[in-house]
Image (cartoon, rainbow, N blue to C red):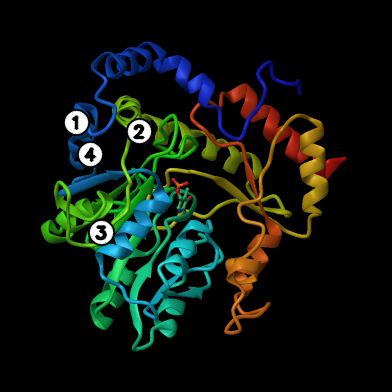
Amino acid sequence: MTKTAKKIQMVDLKSQYEKIKIEVDAAIQNVLDNTAFINGPEVKSFQAELEQYLGVKHVIPCANGTDALQIAMMALDLKPGDEVITADFTYVATAEVIALLGLKPVLVDVVPNTFEIDVKAIEKAITPKTKAIVPVHLFGQCADMEAIMALAKKYNLYVIEDTAQAIGANFKYSDGRSKKAGTIGTIGCTSFFPSKNLGCYGDGGAIFTNDDTLAAKIRIIANHGQSVQYVHDSIGVNSRLDSIQAAVLRIKLRDLDTYAAARNKAANFYDQAFANHPKLKTPARAKFSDHVFHQYTLQLIGVDRNALREFLAGKEIPAMIYYPIPLHLQKAYLDPRYKAGDFPITEKLCDTVVSLPMHTELDEETLNYITDTVLEFFNK
Ligand SMILES: *Cc1c(COP(=O)(O)O)cnc(C)c1O
């Protein structure tokens, strides 16, 4: 085993950029030449191309994924005190906007094998005040949307999909149909943060819906609540996707499926190397979703995680913990309704998960080096 020539990163945006540099540089120069920095033709073209790729009626670009979630909740007219159910094991943004809008985040546990929100736990958490469910398609595969949509129908709830980590993933229905992540619920929200699967070169986000009325409302809210310039019918926010970012995204959207394939190839390599290892549990594939591997996350069984990370760091291999603290134990979200032990799966995952480098540019030499080094840790 030898160290690789290239520095190993969790996400290698530089090598990816080098492959599309000519197109990207020209597209950015084109925006500079036209100076249509806001709502220029690149934004409209990107919107139309993403609508077509996803098979969704409306894509409304916005400034970032957190805004997308906030605008979605504003568009549904949720009122202070309304309860919104989401996963305890997620990035903070999901719960943050619920709390910011004065809504009540209701947390539920996830299932141990796929890390996705536990549908049975959702049903148990529903009360007369529940208005919406926010499933998070964590790490690149979908939550069980067929079951979640059935619950939403039964209890008359909205569904806001947080697909910041799973853009491009297909949800597979039991009857064989499939739909793209983010196009199944009432509204879908995504992020184009640089390290996401469809990342731009700054901040960006988008909201998806098939509902014409909601789409019109979302556009108005994202634009200061104005339908006609200087006429404000509702309180809105200022949330736009820059033309430069849209120009970059148009190029990367063409490669999104190729990127997902490269991520899957790396994931399969990891899977094979760690298969049947007594101390490593490789990530499970849900039968109802394909996986776009935003993260490749192992569960450690009786392993000193810090020692593993230090060992890997010593060999210049980064490894990250997504996420180290469950939402219900975060200081900002402490709530007398919840205490340690309430969400045992999430709590266990926070203590035992570790994510390995995952991106579109991992070659076999690098993967060999990473997997050999991980295995070496256990044999040393
Ligand atoms: C990244 C992310 C967000 C927030 O997106 P930003 O563009 O960073 O605001 C929301 N939810 C999840 C699950 C994410 O991974």
Q: Which of the 4 quarters of the picture holds residue 270?
A: top right
Disc 4 marks a residue whose amino acid type is Tyr
- Specify the amino acid type for callout 2: Leu
Left or right: residue 336 versus residue 101 is right
- The answer for how far apart the CA atoms under marks 1 and 2 are is 16 Å
| Disc 3: CA contacts within 10 A as few (<14), some (14-19) or many (>=20) | many
Residue 174 in view (yes/no): no
Q: Nearer the viewer, residue 6 or 95?
A: 95
Image-based side of 362 in relation to 379, left or right: left
Which label was assigned to residue 256? Answer: 2
Structural distance between the alpha carbons of marks 4 and 3: 14 Å
Q: What residue is shown at x 70% (from left), y 50% (from top)?
A: 277
- Which is nearer the N-term, disc 1 or disc 2? 1
Q: Nearer the viewer, residue 4 or 65?
A: 65
User: In the rendering, which numbered label is found on residue 45?
Assistant: 1
Q: Secondary structure at mark 2?
A: helix
**Could you classify mark 4 by the number of other residues whose Cα lies within 10 Å: few (under 14), some (14-19), or many (20 or more)?**
some
- Which residue does the image show at 45% across and 31% down from the upper left? 262
Q: Residue at x 63, y 50 (%)?
A: 298
Amino acid type at image mark 1 = Ser
Contact, mark 4 vs mark 3 (Cβ under 8 Å): no
The answer to the question of whether label 4 and label 2 lie on touching residues, with beta carbons closer than 8 A, is yes
State the CA–CA distance, disc 3 to disc 2: 20 Å
Please determine whether, in this image, residue 187 is positioned above or below residue 18.
below
Q: Which residue is mark 3?
A: 184
Q: Residue furthest front?
A: 230
Residue at disc 4, secondary structure = helix
Q: Secondary structure beneath disc 1?
A: helix
